[in-house]
Image (cartoon, coloured by chain):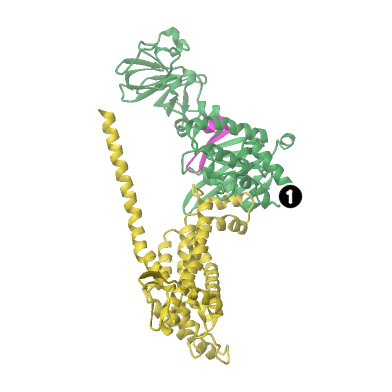
Chain colours: A green, B yellow
Amino acid sequence: MSSAAATVSVPFLQIKRVVKQFDDVFAVDEVSLDIAQGEIFALLGSSGCGKSTLLRMLAGFETPTSGQILLAGQDIVGMAPYERPINMMFQSYALFPHLTVWDNVAFGLRRDGMPKPQIEERVNQMLELVQLKPYAKRKPHQLSGGQQQRVALARSLAKRPKLLLLDEPLGALDAKLRERTQLELVGIIEQVGVTCVMVTHDQEEAMTMATRIGVMSEGKILQVGQPADIYETPNCLFVADFIGSVNIFKGTVEVDEPDHVVIRSPECGHYVSHGITGTAEMQVSIAVRPEKMSIQSTPPEDAQRESPAQVGFNVVQGVIEDLAYLGNLTTYHVRLATGMVVKVTHTNAARHGASGMTWGDAVYAWWCGSDVVVLTQ
Amino acid sequence: MAAPALTATTRRASIHGSWGRAAVIGVPMAFLLVVFLLPFLVVFKISLSEMDTVFFKDILVWKDDALVLALKFGNYLSLTQDTLYFNAYLSSLQVAATTTLICLAIAYPFAYFMARSPADRRPALLMLVMLPFWTSFLLRVYAWKMLLADAGVLNNAAIALGLIAEPVKMMNTPFSLVLGMVYTYVPFMILPLYANLVKMDLRLLEAALDLGATPWQAFWRITVPLSKSGIIAGSMLVFIPCVGEFVIPELLGGPETLMIGHVLWDEFFSNNDWPMAASVAVVMVGLIIIPLALFNKYQAESTAGARA
């Protein structure tokens, strides 16, 4: 870790204007990324967005059409996969079915010609790390999904790679197991201290595990940031919509002041308590997360509002068309007069739904001007 | 009401299930029993009977008001005493083993190439492998005679090109024999290997490369072990018929070729000694079945559940 401090000026992994073209399709389109040592970086996107292609270029299974990939300052583009100090944990693991757990973990060490006693020591150490020592003699098909996942992790960490790649690391596990494994996996990665790039389509997985996230779509990286940045200040409609759930109002800027903005949409007036980079009359989108909204059967009182200036703004009226009770939360789907459906999440803090609102009820949904994100693109 | 109804249906379903299962397994079993096991028992019976100038005696005879079982083991004894039989068995096994190895060496790269070629091109390649079957086997083997003869196509062409001065003797040699066998049986090696290799998960090879294996190492450490069942299946499909092969040695091997198929023919049709011929056949079946059974047992154990 001391070397991290020394090389702070040069990012550990540098992806420079990398392009990958298949026939006339740009799978990866001029992606540049800097990743620091010790980071867990998640490439997040839906299938076909180019995230897997980018990961495969890091592993060496695909060659970039153009661009550079530098690992600790060294260009690795021309290196064969077996020459790179990079190991990958494959989607659904790709464990060798004819080898035991022990031999699977030892596979890479043997290819390096490591002396036998050292291999023995390292494999045991790895199996201890993932708590699979009693299973060393088993074949992969004799293990549960979670155990297979840990073998795959041990195998990819055995050679102490400079960079660890995770391809949908938890995709093959069921929901309950996934939640536990996420934190376990992060624990092990942090314990080893390896820099990590993961690919996932699961935003929850990315948010839980990664220190930073890069949201990808159509071969481009749209936004890079810490999980909270991406969620709270998305820079475009795609990111706002892709991460979590969001209500989007389309409107026109009416008042554009440095400290606040007023936007008019067919549903209501929007008071935004921060300035935007835009001009009056500009068409913009207003994004409000469902959990930032409040719902009640009476109009919000002035005292409830964030500031007196917001009275009359940021409030819509509608009818509950649908509700999804999830135990801890209830999501209300409120149909507005304009036809738009607004989603509002209500935390069920009290045991017996204090709100008492149900299908067909006329309700008011309102929110604070500081919780709004204005998207100009 | 619901519970008894449920039991009734499940019972009926299970009866149907066991009947269906019995029928599905039973029909082929009965077929094999009638056309394979019974005739084999007849052959076995003949092998234990005695020759009576032109025909063989029954092993069960009435003698002095008693039913006597007369078994003659002399045929089996003479199999061990006359080196002709031992040599014939040995050379059959040798030819079959050589053929199998050469077929494997040719078929593996071919099947590998087929399995790795684009999916839309595979049916055409598969068709090419099976194309020879569309012509008579006899015709194709006979064609080799024309090609390999002293005054055959190959020798004439080589002499015309000035590569050789005298014709090279190829016909009626071990070379022509094995060539004919390999030519005939190589598709039987290719098909199971292809079926195996095409199913292989290519990500396993990527995983091997990722862990530092060169492509060559990945081939030997991953591809070959994982295609073991295909190698075994193909080898059996080639080896077994090769041991008893009669037509190819007759046509391409020449008169000196000593193979068990030929010995069998001689005993049946030249010597007309059916009991002797039958015992030769019984021992041949034994020679093939025992290693086969061992192979099968080993394979069943090693692959049990491995295809998870």
Work out whether residue B70 or residue A309 is closer to the camera in this orientation and state it: B70
* Visible residue check, residue A96: yes
Which residue is drawn at the image coordinates 73% and 45% (left, top)? A118
Task: Indicate the secondary structure of the residue bearing disc 1.
Answer: loop
Characterize the local packing of mark 1: few (<14), some (14-19) or many (20 or more) Cα atoms within 10 angstroms. few
Horizontal and vertical percent position of residue B264: 45, 78
Horizontal and vertical percent position of residue B261: 46, 77
Describe residue A121's horizontal placement relative to residue A240 as left or right: right
- Name the outermost residue toward the left: B1
What amino acid type should be assigned to the residue bearing mark 1?
A: Pro
Q: Quadrant of residue B27?
A: bottom left
Q: Chain of mark 1?
A: A
* Visible residue check, residue B112: no
Q: Is residue B189 above or below residue A314?
A: below
Horizontal and vertical percent position of residue B232: 51, 61
Asked if residue A160 lies in the magenta stretch, the reply is no
Identify the residue under disc 1.
A115
Which span is picked out in magenta? A204-223
Asked if residue A222 lies in the magenta stretch, the reply is yes
Describe residue B131's horizontal placement relative to residue A151 as left or right: left
